[in-house]
Amino acid sequence: MTSTETTPSREAPIQPGDVLLSIENLRACVEENEILRGVSLQIRAGEIHALMGRNGSGKSTLSKVIAGHPAYTVTAGSIHYRGQDLLAFSPEERARSGVFLGFQYPVEIPGVSNLEFLRVSCNARRQHRGQEELDTFAFEDHVRETMAIVQMDPAFLERSVNEGFSGGEKKRNEVLQMALLEPLVAILDETDSGLDIDALRIVANGVKRLALPTTATLLITHYQRLLDAITPDFVHVMAEGRILRTGDKDLAMALEERGYDWIDETDGSDVRQP
Amino acid sequence: MSNATQFRSRLWLETLLQTLARQPGGGVAGQRAGDCDWDLPSRRSEAWRFTDLRCLTRLDPGRLHTRTASPHWPEAVRQAPSGQGSPLRLCLQLDSRGHWLSPQGEPPPWPRGLMPLANEDITPGQVARTLMPAGPLPLGARLNSVTPGPSLGLRVSGPDFIHLDLGIRVEQAQAWLAPHVLLVLEPGARLCLSWHVAVTAPAAVLPMVEARLGLGAQLEEAAMTWGCPEAAFLGGSFVHQSPWSVYRRTNVTWGWGLSRDEPFIRQCQGRAETHLHGLAVARGQSLLDTHSTVYFDGPAGRLRQRHQALADDQGHSVFNGRVVAPRLAQETDAGQLSRNLLLSAKARIDTKPQLEIVADNVQCTHGATVSCLQDDELFYLQSRGIGRDQASRLLQRGFCEEILQRLPEAALSWPPLRSLLETPTPDQP
Ligand SMILES: Nc1ncnc2c1ncn2[C@@H]1O[C@H](COP(=O)(O)OP(=O)(O)O)[C@@H](O)[C@H]1O
Ligand SMILES: [Mg+2]
């Protein structure tokens, strides 16, 4: 994809259709409150999944549990990533091995330069893949090239990580990180929220470019408009910590028309797992 | 302090003062030292209750010397054009006899606008005394003024910005260095003074800086002081500001067993600007203490102060920010912020504003925060493949950046500061 990939990846090759992420009956809580109440989901290489649901239904929690956020305790169930027990790995190991979470609320880190942050993180992933690390100069070329994907101004490299970025700029920065880390499983948590039409198109194009037959994408979203740009293979609807329903893009359209109440009224008996 | 400890510290001080009085040039200082009617501050006194002087009193007065090493001048600083062209830059290092020489060991080529003062025009404490007419001088300044040795006195004039870099490096145990610098900035004069102090052995450095800023004069002072765990630093700065003068001080200190920094600034008729920015990085068993005073002796003065400290291991940071606005200091605008990062259960932060505001029409804000590394920030970095240790170090450096970015560009090329700034390397697997 980019000129810097001189050394081949040490990562085992992936065939389209391989199961990348497999979540079974996952339960998780914060302090005493159970938030995830038995989530099951399987994601294969080449697939794009959309995860929808009311505010507070547990979508972000699911994404953070996958990424390894320490605030959540898994009480039952499992997550396997490429056949390995993902829950046994630290957050940084998950990221290095190709699991990426685009945050709903990207964190501002004053004093840490965006350029340096991107370089250190990109090199951590490269090191894991057995690729040579990029020095300051090589990385700067690489990142400028990559920034073009999200049409981001290189001036953002000089700033502190996300500090003072507008909502849209933060989301572009997330997609930039995704592009640099070349994840195998990308989870994008409401990356479309708060974007104007142009920014949405840019972000959607970026995500589409990065979705390959050998990678998988989980889009957490409220809006049909992102799914108009990126057609999902599966649409899941989450409520109260469970996936209530799974369908194809028509399910998203039906939701857009009828609202989430419609899901509550139907009993979820026609749940179809991919 | 127990009686035995008190007795020991008294004995140490007396022996020290007698030794200093016997040194060459110790005549005048000797007389001052002779009448030893004072004592080291005890921890019973409010201003010293956190500050343990053992690092200083462990030095053996009988073995003190003034031998210095050559500072590791970075090329960027040393190679800068000196004397000619703009900006005017002069690098000086302290030699073993207390003289300031060029890095080549020669007497300084004074650039235009920088004129040495005659010895008889320099008495240590002359500015300090006008700023603090009552009461004793701070300990560092007191010890400085009883230590014999030449002063560096400079008159600064003209509109050109002059850069003066002063380097002190100590590598031998038992060194006792008490340089005295007096700066007289004529109206409108501009000076950028950078201190680079590096000490790698059990020793003490006790600099005293006195500065008189004329109308509209501008002094930018950057002090990078780096010591080892057995070394002590006691600094005193006394700045007299005339109206419309600007004094900016940025101070970065780390590594010392004990550091006590006591800047005292007086805006003598108000209407001046003072900016104080300090960063203390206390790791190991380091104790880094800043006691600052800004005194507004007239109306419409302005202060912007920010002190940041990072304490890890058993490090301890102390900050006491005194701001005095008597009745005549109407329309003073003072802001003080103390930000602290606490990284271990045994580390300690003591921070306290000391606002003595009598004037009624004054804007004075102050704030203090003590926090740990933020879980959300750590997790964000980790979720990008950055290991926990490396993430923690990135955040620590990010915390320091606010102050570091105020240092002059050339200061950043000093090796010790570079190592403080280094991009943390990935955790070893
Ligand atoms: N760290 C947390 N502490 C306490 N409650 C939390 C935490 N994270 C999530 N929750 C709660 O879990 C529920 C699901 O939240 P979230 O996963 O953010 O929902 P969604 O992303 O679907 O809007 C909400 O009720 C929320 O308040
Ligand atoms: Mg959410």
Image: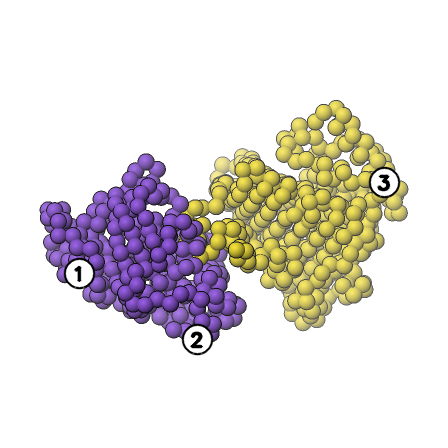
Chain colours: A purple, B yellow
Q: Which chain letter goes with mark 2?
A: A
Amino acid of disc 3: Gly
Query: Which residue is located at x 31 percent, y 57 percent?
Result: A21
Q: Which chain letter goes with mark 1?
A: A
Respond whether the residues carrying marks 3 and 1 are from the same subunit: no
Query: Which residue is located at x 65 percent, y 56 percent?
Result: B416
| Percent position of residue A258, x then y | 11, 54
- Whether label 3 touches label 1, CB < 8 Å: no
Instruction: Give the foreground label among 1 and 2.
Output: 1
Disc 3: which residue: B62
Tell which of A9 and B394 is nearer to you.
A9
| Percent position of residue B326, x then y | 57, 37
Query: Which residue is located at x 69 percent, y 49 percent?
Result: B227
Left or right for B226, reference A210: right
Tell which of B410 and B399 is nearer to you.
B399
Disc 1: which residue: A248
Query: Which residue is located at x 38 percent, y 43 percent?
Result: A71
Task: Answer with mark 1 or mark 2, whichever residue precedes in sequence.
Answer: 2
Respond whether the residues carrying marks 2 and 3 are from the same subunit: no
Q: In the orientation shown, which residue stands out farthest toward the top? A: B3
Amino acid of disc 2: Ser
Q: Residues within 10 Å of mark 1 (few under 14, many from 20)?
A: some
Amino acid of disc 1: Asp
Give residue A3's mark. 2
| Percent position of residue B189, x then y | 65, 59
